[in-house]
Image (cartoon, rainbow, N blue to C red):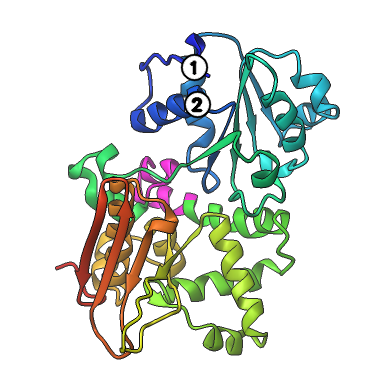
């Protein structure tokens, strides 16, 4: 249902304007009673919701589920959320997946007096019951880091080296950006992944993530990694899927055709953010990157993310195609704008 209070005023959006994301959210909030913004931690979801709230014409209520006081307020979600009007923002929703049952009831009310914007650092598949409970009532918008279209071509080198996390990209110095990324890796391993159900030591997780950095832009080889960790193939695949569900990895699935050639059927693995990739590889400066053996793979992942964002393609629409023994990859996107293909001669340096 369209309503006047979903109109947004575009002003005071900060140093890097994310107007396209704000417009997309405004459209979804006109069409759906519940909208989920998902993406990795510290990518700017709360800031984006704040900018949306500033332009919202009507009352706005905010809950942060990392705040014990807000958690206590939501002990009885129907009682707390029922009387609210306007825009209701619930941050870190993956901490209380049981809230989706209450949102379903509220979303089905006549005239829909409130719209709900839920923010989370885990994919809907990882939050049990969200997709089923709110089917037909919720739309998801994935927020990635800054793109080249947002920061401008003149800052390409900085974006590639530091990645798109706002605090990393906007760091006052290269060492400051580096320290921020190191702390993000530590916090993610010690706090966020255990909260999502992965019960492994932080040192083991760091070693697994660092090994994946060396496999960046390569086809997934479960047997090789399982031998290195002394566990079953299915176990390391579980680790991989969890990192992907937390938006730290991109798994590019193979496109399958009924051809006589032996096609590659395992996904390609990419760290989504080149800044985190470089932190895990020990790449601090631009000259370190230019001399590193993974420079070509880093550039490939960077440009892949840029193309996906530019096309607005969904993960299920992005594929690669290759045959065993071939040196060329073909990337395929089937987006709203139509099918689009690109070929590559494999990882190589940009220059």
Under circle 1, the secondary element is: loop
Rendered residue at 23%/58% (across/down):
340
Classed neighbour count for the residue bearing mark 2: other residues with Cα under 10 Å, few (<14), some (14–19), many (≥20): some
SS majority, magenta: helix
Rendered residue at 29%/91% (across/down):
325
Horizontal side of 256 relative to 68 (left or right) equals left
- Asked if residue 17 shows in the view, the reply is no
Rendered residue at 70%/19% (across/down):
109
Residue 33 quadrant: top right
Of 212 and 326, which appears nearest the observer?
326
Horizontal side of 116 relative to 274 (left or right) equals right
Q: Is residue 332 magenta?
A: no
Q: Position of residue 16 (x, y in %)?
A: 33, 32
Which disc number belongs to residue 2? 1
Q: Is residue 171 magenta?
A: yes
Residue 112 quadrant: top right
Of 194 and 96, which appears nearest the observer?
96
Horizontal side of 167 relative to 183 (left or right) equals left
Q: Which residue is mark 2?
A: 31
- Asked if residue 164 shows in the view, the reply is yes
Q: Position of residue 159 (x, y in %)?
A: 30, 49
Look at the image and give the residue range highlighted in magenta.
164-180
Horizontal side of 259 relative to 204 (left or right) equals left
């Amino acid at each position: 249902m369209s309503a006047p209070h979903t109109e947004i005023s575009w002003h005071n959006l900060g140093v890097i304007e994310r107007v396209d994301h704000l417009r997309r959210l405004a459209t979804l909030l006109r069409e759906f009673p519940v909208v989920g913004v998902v993406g990795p931690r510290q990518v700017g979801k709360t800031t984006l919701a704040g900018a949306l709230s500033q332009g919202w014409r009507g009352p706005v209520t905010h809950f942060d589920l990392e705040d014990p006081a807000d958690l206590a307020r939501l002990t009885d979600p129907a009682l707390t959320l029922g009387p609210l009007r306007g825009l209701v923002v619930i941050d870190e929703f993956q901490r209380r997946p049981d809230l989706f049952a209450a949102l379903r009831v509220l979303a089905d009310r006549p005239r829909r007096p409130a719209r709900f914007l839920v923010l989370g650092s885990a994919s809907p598949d990882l939050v049990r019951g969200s997709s089923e409970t709110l089917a037909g009532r919720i739309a998801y918008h994935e927020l990635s880091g800054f793109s080249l279209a947002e920061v401008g071509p003149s800052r390409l080198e900085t974006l590639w080296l530091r990645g798109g996390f706002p605090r990393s990209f906007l760091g006052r110095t290269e060492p400051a950006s580096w320290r921020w990324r190191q702390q993000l890796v530590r916090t993610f391993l010690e706090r966020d992944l255990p909260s999502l159900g992965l019960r492994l030591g932080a040192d083991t997780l760091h070693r697994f993530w660092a090994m994946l950095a060396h496999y960046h832009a390569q086809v997934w080889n479960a047997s090789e990694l399982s031998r290195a960790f002394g566990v079953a193939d299915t176990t390391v695949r579980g680790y991989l899927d969890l990192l992907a569900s937390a938006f730290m990895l991109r798994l590019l699935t193979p496109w399958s055709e009924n051809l006589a050639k032996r096609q590659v059927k395992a996904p390609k693995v990419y760290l989504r953010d080149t800044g985190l990739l470089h932190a895990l590889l020990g790449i601090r400066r631009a000259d370190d990157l230019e001399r590193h053996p993974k420079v070509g793979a880093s550039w490939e992942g960077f440009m892949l993310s840029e193309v996906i964002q530019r096309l607005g393609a969904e993960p299920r629409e992005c594929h690669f195609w290759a045959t065993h023994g071939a040196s060329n990859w073909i990337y395929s996107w089937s987006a709203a704008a139509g099918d689009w293909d690109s070929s590559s001669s494999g990882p190589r340096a940009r220059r």
